[in-house]
Amino acid sequence: MKDDKENKKYEVQYEIDIPVVVFSYKKKDGDKETVFVQKYSYNSMFEKFGIKKEEADENNPDKIISSLENLFTKDKVTLEIFQFTKYAIHFRAEDDTTIFKAFLEPTLQSNEALVKLNPGQKTNIQWEISIPWVIFSYTDENGVVFEEKLNYNSMYEKFGMQQNEEDKKNEYKLKGTITRYFYQNKVSLEPFQQDKYYAIEFKSEENDTTLFKVFLKPKMHINLVPHKDNPELKFNIEWVIDIPDVIFTYKEKKDGKDIIYRGQLGYDCTFEKFGMKKEEKDNKNPQGLTAVIKKYFDEGKAKIRNEKEFHNMFYSIEFLEEGDKTLFKVFLKY
């Protein structure tokens, strides 16, 4: 599909999942991907294309698919770009008159919330509805992302709303409700610095009583790591830089229970172990160290090993330098 002005090609997607039709465009900027979406009811698409909907069309979208594909094939679909932050998919008829425009919105929303215990101060909260989840996140001053996923259907109960059949696939009602709470200053962020987590509090619209809280946890990176002595064995290692610590964990099931093996390094100490000079900008910005750790995992320069201390079995992550020599180990203990 072409851009209206520059004649470049852009990939847009559509999906018909009765009773909705979803149009989307993914904008990539390095490793970051932003998804822009618009949804319409299935029935409204017949009106837009001037098609009389018959009983056979109730669960058969072939006519709508045919109409859309015909426009894509004839280059009658273009992407309108508004300062690279807003987008619209423009559908045109044979004579180039507009059939309709699908104005796309980013799925990731950002709204200001009050900072609890600090009157007048506000901070940005990110949230996204991605059925079957509603995802809330907050990035603290150290660059650590804290996140929590809530069940989409349960959010209706939390807000005291009735959910009809259309709401199960169309998030407009819930999206509007969440946005309204932010605009009414009924949302606040409560930091628990000692325990290193945050809570987003939603208050009732009628008064200031707590409606519910969303407790955010550090968002872990996940890497698949081979066993040092048996490379065919792969282990999911989770890690996060949560200044002043760098935390590594491995989870396995034993007797139906999750056993968590955990290792921890000091933030400053980790720079030394990788032979890096820590600069002033690194004090509160972990992106440089994050990139280095990720590079070791991605290039296969990190392995997991079994360890034993007396009768206790545990694991270690071994980071390797040139020639596969051991640079250092992080011991993961239960």
Image (cartoon, rainbow, N blue to C red):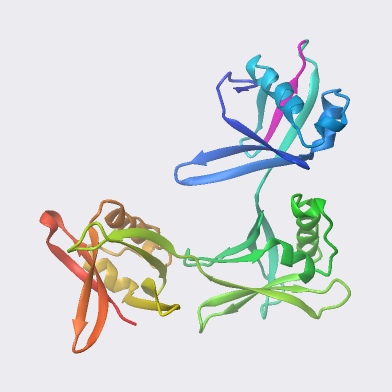
On whether residue 263 falls in the magenta region, the answer is no
Residue 280 rendering spot, x and y as whole percentages: 36, 64
**Residue 312 at least partly seen:** yes
- The total number of labels drawn is 0
Query: 24 or 253, which lies in front?
Result: 253
Relative to 67, say whether 218 is above or below. below
Relative to 111, say whether 52 is above or below. above
Identify the residue shown where x is 45% and y is 65%. 220
- Residue at the front extreme of this rendering: 56
Query: 1 or 246, which lies in front?
Result: 1
Identify the residue shown where x is 82% and y is 60%. 163
* Residue 52, image quadrant: top right
Residue 307 rendering spot, x and y as whole percentages: 21, 77
Dominant secondary structure, magenta: strand
Horizontal relation, residue 326 to residue 300: left or right: left
Residue 306 rendering spot, x and y as whole percentages: 22, 73
* Residue 297, image quadrant: bottom left
Q: Which residues are magenta?
A: 87-94
The quadrant of the image that shows the N terminus is: top right
The quadrant of the image that shows the C terminus is: bottom left
* Residue 256, image quadrant: bottom left
